């Protein structure tokens, strides 16, 4: 029973810390452009080289 007295406040603190981190990430714009990153990974940044080995 004495372990519960320590574990419940620790669990509540960690849950509140996670909630604060999630709210901070929402306010800082982390989830603004979800489609852009998904499309950007498919785009080539540089043109392919012609002629093979140089």
Image (cartoon, rainbow, N blue to C red):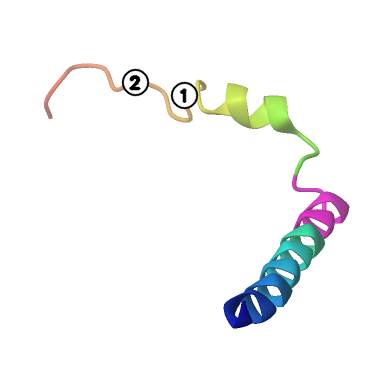
Q: Residue at x 50, y 21 (%)?
A: 42
Please tell me whether the stretch drawn in magenta is mainly helix, strand or loop.
helix
Whether residue 53 sits left or right of residue 13 in the image: it is: left
Q: Quadrant of the C terminus?
A: top left
The answer to which image quadrant residue 19 occupies is: bottom right
Image position, residue 44 (x, y; %): 46, 24
On the image, which quarter does residue 23 sit in? bottom right
Q: Which residue is mark 1?
A: 44
Q: Nearer the viewer, mark 2 or mark 1?
A: 1
Residue 4 in the image: above or below residue 52: below
Q: Which mark is residue 48?
A: 2
Distance, label 2 to label 1, CA atoms, is: 9 Å
| Few, some or many residues within 10 Å of mark 2 (<14, 14–19, 20+) | few
What's drawn in magenta, residue-wise?
Answer: 22-30
Residue extending farthest front: 1
Mark 2–mark 1 CB contact (< 8 Å): yes
Residue 28 quadrant: bottom right
Q: Is residue 35 magenta?
A: no
Per the image, label 1 sits on a secondary structure element best described as: loop
User: In the image as oriented, which residue stretches furthest toward the top?
Assistant: 51
Q: Nearer the viewer, residue 25 or 39?
A: 25
Check the image and name the residue furthest to the right: 27
Q: Position of residue 8 (x, y in %)?
A: 70, 71
């Amino acid at each position: 029973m004495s372990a519960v007295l320590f574990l419940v406040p620790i669990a509540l603190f960690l849950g509140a810390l996670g909630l604060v981190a999630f709210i901070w990430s929402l306010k800082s714009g982390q989830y603004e452009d979800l489609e852009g990153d998904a499309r950007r990974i498919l785009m080539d940044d540089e043109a392919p080289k012609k002629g093979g080995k140089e």
